[in-house]
Amino acid sequence: MSEQGLSEALVERMARLSLRTLAIYASILIVSSAVLSALSLRHSMGRTADVIESLLGLYADPGGARTPVAPAMLADQLVGVGSRFVITRRSADDEGTRRTYFLTTDMPAKAIDGISSDAGASDISEVIRKALSARGWQYQLLHRTVGSFDVFVATDRTPYVLGLLGISTAALALLPVGLSVARRATRDTVAEALDPVERVRQQIARIGPDSLDVRLASPTGLRETSEIAATVNELLVRMERAQRGLASFTADASHELRTPLTYMRAQAQWALDGARSGDELRDALAGVLVEADRMHRMLEGLLLLARGDSRELEARRDVMLVAPLLADVAEVGHGMAVGKSVTVEVQASEALAVLGDQDHTRQILLNLVSNAVRHTATGRILVQAEPAGESVDIVVSDPGIGMTPEELPKIFERFYRVEPSRSRAHGGAGLGLSIARLLAEFQGGTLTAQSRHGEGSRFTLRLPRAASPPLDVIGDAPRV
């Protein structure tokens, strides 16, 4: 199923948003126009009623007869108002019956037929509305009581309704035009905004396995796209480093495996080439066994590193007393130093405890001590543990040959050896420190190194500190 492009999706969503916005705007415009028309109409009728109310003060005859108080002038003024209006008055006739009268411009009061004596202003309004037009909705009436008079002002709604219809028609007719303009503007804006993204996509598409050294252009003109380009560049750096590391790893692994296999093949051919004595065959088989053991250890190390890379390595979180573990490692170190003027000493508090995996921690420390013994001709190798806030630092220091500033950053790389020939003579493949750092990280710890050429080295294993010593001990290390 084909997916919709980002540009098309944004244009469609913005078009729907624009349509809703324009529809809401048109609705607000129509409603506002209707409200303003109604207010304007009511205001106009109110002013007319005000004028009529002020003129009614000239009519002072409570009985309806002509008065000497300028009725003709009053009639002229009322005619000049210019709006439709009716003035009524409720009063008793000669027989004492209350009737409703309306005043004409000639000023005699004439009774309104069809109005009951108990009719109210609403009833009179309805009669007047029907008299004005058969379509009652066309006129709006305003009623106001002025003393004994009722003033009814009528205004034709037709001009206001026609104006409102015109505004509504124009607003609705302009909706498609506005939508078309908004869609085109959105398309241009989205295309301009996504142009940096498209450029980044094209640059990424040109990068292949053989061109990992290429970097994306940055800045791109858009902050978010520039951040994406910077992130991709960082990813390319890691990929390039990983590719170089993989190529180097493959070459080193091939070399390390080729060397013992070549030796084993040569020994086998030598043993099979002619008659050999029993001692010669035993020596040949012993050499083959040594190389086979070396290959086995290297393959085990590679398998361990592969499990770590794929996050399949498991590490327990046990509480371990440090002193017994260091004593065990020092005892093995003494055995490694037999025949050399080298001693292994331990300094650690009996109550100091850490959280970690006992087997992994022991393997790390044995690797560090064996390296120290291997590269120290004479002197004291010190294994000590000291608190460091919420952690514990286990330090292995030696007075050996040390490392140069160029060598120090590379010692944790796989198959790297400071002295390749000497390491091979001792059976090393350059994987020990890589494995040690991996095991430290899987326990939530770190492994760092400090060294000066000719002055020795100092390796620090930092592990989380246990809150208190364990209550029960399993083997040499306590367990929660």
Image (cartoon, rainbow, N blue to C red):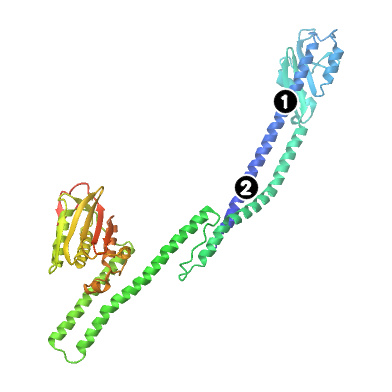
Q: Which label sits on residue 174? A: none
Tell me which residue sits at (27%, 78%) in the image: 259
Q: Where 163 falls versus 233 (above or below)?
A: above
Mark 2, secondary structure of its residue:
helix
Is residue 207 left or right of 86 when viewed as pictured?
A: left
Question: What amino acid is found at the position of numbered circle 2 in the picture?
Answer: Ser
Q: Which label sits on residue 18? A: 2
Question: What amino acid is found at the position of numbered circle 1 in the picture?
Answer: His
Q: Looking at the image, is mark 2 or mark 1 earlier in the sequence?
A: 2
Tell me which residue sits at (60%, 55%) in the image: 192
Q: Position of residue 282 (x, y in %)?
A: 15, 83
Tag 1 residue:
43
Q: Position of residue 432 (x, y in %)?
A: 26, 66
Q: Depth check: 429 or 343 in front?
A: 343
Residue density around tag 1, few if under 14, some if 14–19, many if 20 or more, within 10 Å = few
Q: Depth check: 256 or 466 in front?
A: 256
Q: Is residue 314 visible?
A: no
- Which quadrant holds residue 8? bottom right
